[in-house]
Image (spheres, rainbow, N blue to C red):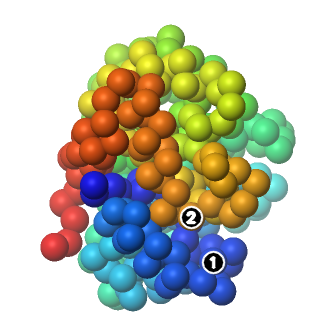
Amino acid sequence: MYLIDTHSHLYEPQFDADRDDCLARAAEAGVGRLLLPAIDSESHARLFDLCRRHPRRCIPMMGLHPTSVNDNPRWREELAAVEEYLRTPPEGIARFCAVGEIGLDFYWSADFRAEQTEAFRRQCLLAAERGLPVAIHTRDAWPEMVETIEELRGTGLRGVFHAFAESAETYRRLRACGDFLFGIGGVVTFKKSALAGTVAEMALDDLVVETDCPYLTPAPHRGERNESAYVRFVCEKIAELKGTTPDEVAAATTANAERMFGPFPD
């Protein structure tokens, strides 16, 4: 089994004590690559350092997270830095595999809706111009997200809806907008998870697996810190829901990730 964790924050401080051990456990679980979304300038140094130390296994993205727009008078400067990095990656970084993590998040506050929407649309168009996929974060903003993606249809926008946990109807509506995949994480393993019913209706060719570690830990480790090795539990749950084998799910989701985010270094 060979898996790609398409959304990992292994560079975050929660892993400072055992980051290399986490990478080793991921390898033992069959997780060959970790795709690492950016958040904002406060974490860029940690992100770049990890990717420089493990250039074949840890692949960076570059983008501005929606909550980093909130109450931030410098958010347009942050966006300018994203654009500059995408034009000229820093020393030791060969390429960014996506523009991410970007999106809309009104969970903490809806007061910055206009600013978040502007930042999201600008980064979507930037990704389309550069031929890169996007990694899209959505929380308490799905109606606005669907509307925005439908408005951007035809621009060449493509990518992954990270931590997707919505209805089959929302899946079909977004899938009709273009070349989009759906990141399935630990929520699918939760007891009585509504996502399980949605995944049963989704095409395997539309899925990638992810952890969002250190968050959204799957069963049987729910309540603990998440890590990339645990993406295999997501794979196994999808296989159960689809009536197939974990190996088949691993092969399909890895192929999907490689198509969307590759090419990767040998």
**Residue at point 83% right, 41% down?**
109
In terms of secondary structure, where does tag 2 sit?
loop
Residue 48 falls left or right of residue 139: left
> From what the image shows, is residue 81 above or below residue 159?
below
In terms of secondary structure, where does tag 1 sit?
helix
Which residue is at the front of the view, 82 or 77?
82
Disc number placed over residue 15 in the picture, else none: 1
Residue type for callout 1: Phe
Figure quadrant of the N terminus: bottom left
> From what the image shows, is residue 225 above or below residue 21?
above
Residue to which mark 2 is pinned: 227
Res 248 → quadrant: top left
Distance between mark 2 and mark 1 Cα atoms: 9 Å
Residue 197 falls left or right of residue 243: right
Query: Is residue 118 something that shows in the picture?
Result: no
Residue 75: percent from left, percent from top: 66, 60
Q: Which class describes the residues within 10 Å of circle 1: few (<14), some (14-19), or many (20+)?
A: some
**Residue at point 57% right, 35% down?**
188
**Residue at point 50% right, 48% down?**
233
> From what the image shows, is residue 203 above or below residue 237?
above
> From what the image shows, is residue 18 above or below residue 210?
below
Residue 111 falls left or right of residue 75: right
Disc number placed over residue 112 in the picture, else none: none
Residue 234: percent from left, percent from top: 49, 44
